[in-house]
Amino acid sequence: MSLSFVFHNISGAVLPIDDLGFEFALDQQVVWGVFGIDKISESEDLILAVAAGSLEVIETISNTVFDVPQAIRHIATGTGGGIVNDDGILRVHASPRPLDTTTYFTGAGDLTEDGGATWQRGQGERMLFMMKSSEPSKCVDLVFADEVHLKDGFMIVEGAPFGACLDITIVAPPGAVAPVEYGEIPVAKYGNKVPLLKDGWFPMNAQDGGRVPAGMIVRLMIYNATGENDQDPAATFKVAGRIEMFREHTVDPMG
């Protein structure tokens, strides 16, 4: 599939773009390739016209009209850094990453201390488990300020006994999908009794991303061995994790 981008003059008048030596007729649409991608990314007059609401950028396959920040970013970076042919068609490749998101690797969630009114991205609970032989399980809850799309992850293990394992569950906090009195509700499970054994690196790979709405809990639960059903006795061991995801905001917005 190829995406085609056009400029559309919505100024209600003839619109000159002086630094490109071009003049848009009333309501005229022009594909990007008419100008050449290098010239587009260097044109201050195009950016000024978009910022003033005189010119819009349209992706014609889905008939998407970009908002002003998106349009300016596409102009300044050449459609987000993509390669555009001379006919104005953007070369694309299949990707599980949703539009307007960034690939983000993290070993921690986000932090809120006021019920979600403000957030500190990346400053929440960390995916670190120091399991003791006296502990049957241990939990880490990751919460994110924005909608995220979980893709891959891995766990690094040191000294895990035979029988130790991991659950990954998406949990709705109280009041998210039901009255508060019902408390937390599991809504999806991404990992069930995933084995952890001895020392090693345990990847969990997927070809696409699973959507997690903002405020949902990504719960990681490590279970110790029990000594039952041929399992080793409970032991002291370490686990650390990392998630690959797609999200719109990777740092806290300025201001």
Image (tube, helix red, strand yellow):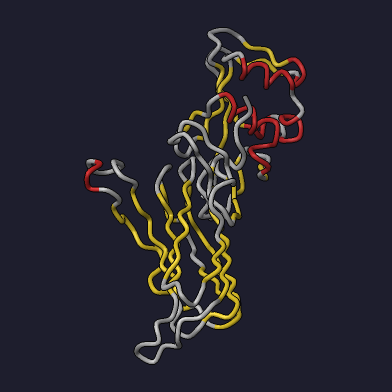
Looking at the image, the residue that sits furthest to the top is 13
Left or right: 92 with respect to 39?
A: left
Looking at the image, the residue that sits furthest to the front is 134
Coordinates of residue 166 in the picture (x, y in percent): 44, 71
Q: Quadrant of residue 169?
A: bottom left
Coordinates of residue 159 in the picture (x, y in percent): 58, 80
How many labels, in total? 0
Residue at x-position 68% and y-position 37%: 78
Residue 73 versus residue 10: which sits nearer the camera?
73
Coordinates of residue 24 in the picture (x, y in percent): 62, 16
Residue at x-position 36% and y-position 87%: 228
Left or right: 6 with respect to 234?
A: right
Residue at x-position 43% and y-position 83%: 163
Residue 172 versus residue 92: which sits nearer the camera?
172
Coordinates of residue 46 in the picture (x, y in percent): 68, 21
Residue at x-position 64% and y-position 16%: 49
Q: Quadrant of the C terminus?
A: top right
In this rendering, the answer to whether 78 lies above or below 43 is below
Residue 193 versus residue 96: which sits nearer the camera?
193
Residue 90 versus residue 111: which sits nearer the camera?
111
In this rendering, the answer to whether 170 lies above or below 255 is below
